[in-house]
Amino acid sequence: MVCEKCTCETCQQREKLEVEFPDKEIGLQYAVWDLEKFRLIVSAEEVPYIQEELRDQPLQCLHEEKVKYILAYGVFRSQTKVQEEFFDLHTSKMGTYFYFDSEKEQSFEVKIVDYSILAKQKDEAKVCLLLKANDFLPFPRSQEELSVTLSLMIPEFGNTLKDLIFSRLEYGFFRLDSGKIIDKEKIGHWKKQISSKKCFEISYKRFLLIEQSVER
């Protein structure tokens, strides 16, 4: 029996990259983690902390007296089964979110001041965000590194990643690929700072190009 070859957009993109980069392993950042009663979307660096193989530091809250304003580009993934018509994106303005920094082993609070939708496709939207954060986010420096994931922060869940991450069951999340710090005096017309080149570079599915391990 011959299995039919998958022709979805994701598989087609993967095949194209496999031909273009034969010496690389092609991967995706996110996977679905099946639990007893629900399915949770997780990123590779988060799994050891969710399973408590590693322990992270408690969440660091945003300190308003030393904020930086950051313009960030990426993709929002809506949980359309719960929130129709990108309702969870529209309610993100002035919302409190967090990202996990695997190098520091800690989650950090950020606030979404505003957002701009650049394009939509099914349950995903290309976006540009205006963020308030205490530090510049750890955006990927190459196609081998993971993007930054922003998830809605629900303090009642706890203050470590294994608890906070469960907001993704009902609310959408952001995958941020790049960004820059902007001056406070430019905030009033921040959308004029959006780069058309950066908009073009955003992909709905971001593949990782990983060096293949050499067997000894």
Image (cartoon, rainbow, N blue to C red):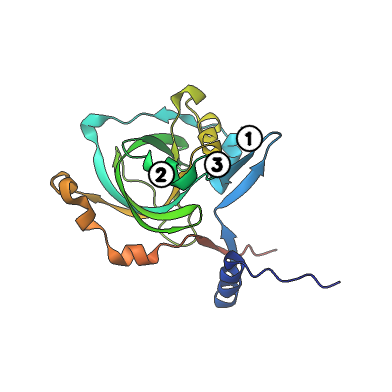
Compute the Cα span from label 1 to label 3: 9 Å
Q: Position of residue 3 (x, y in %)?
A: 79, 70
**Which residue corresponds to the image point at 57% horizontal and 36% vertical from the top-left?**
49
Q: Which residue is mark 1?
A: 51
Helix, strand or loop status at disc 1: loop
Task: Judge the density around disc 1: few (<14), some (14-19), many (≥20) Cα neighbours within 10 Å.
Answer: few
Compute the Cα span from label 2 to label 3: 23 Å
> Which of labels 2 and 1 is toward the front?
2
In this rendering, is residue 206 above or below 89? below
In this image, 67 relative to 40: left or right? left
Figure quadrant of residue 42: top right
- Disc number at residue 89? 2
Sequence-wise first label, 2 or 3: 3
In this image, 52 relative to 101: left or right? right
Helix, strand or loop status at disc 2: helix
Amino acid type shown at disc 2 = Leu
In this rendering, is residue 160 above or below 17? above
Q: Residue pushed farthest top?
A: 156
**Which residue corresponds to the image point at 43% horizontal and 61% vertical from the top-left?**
142
Compute the Cα span from label 2 to label 1: 29 Å
In this image, 134 relative to 82: left or right? left
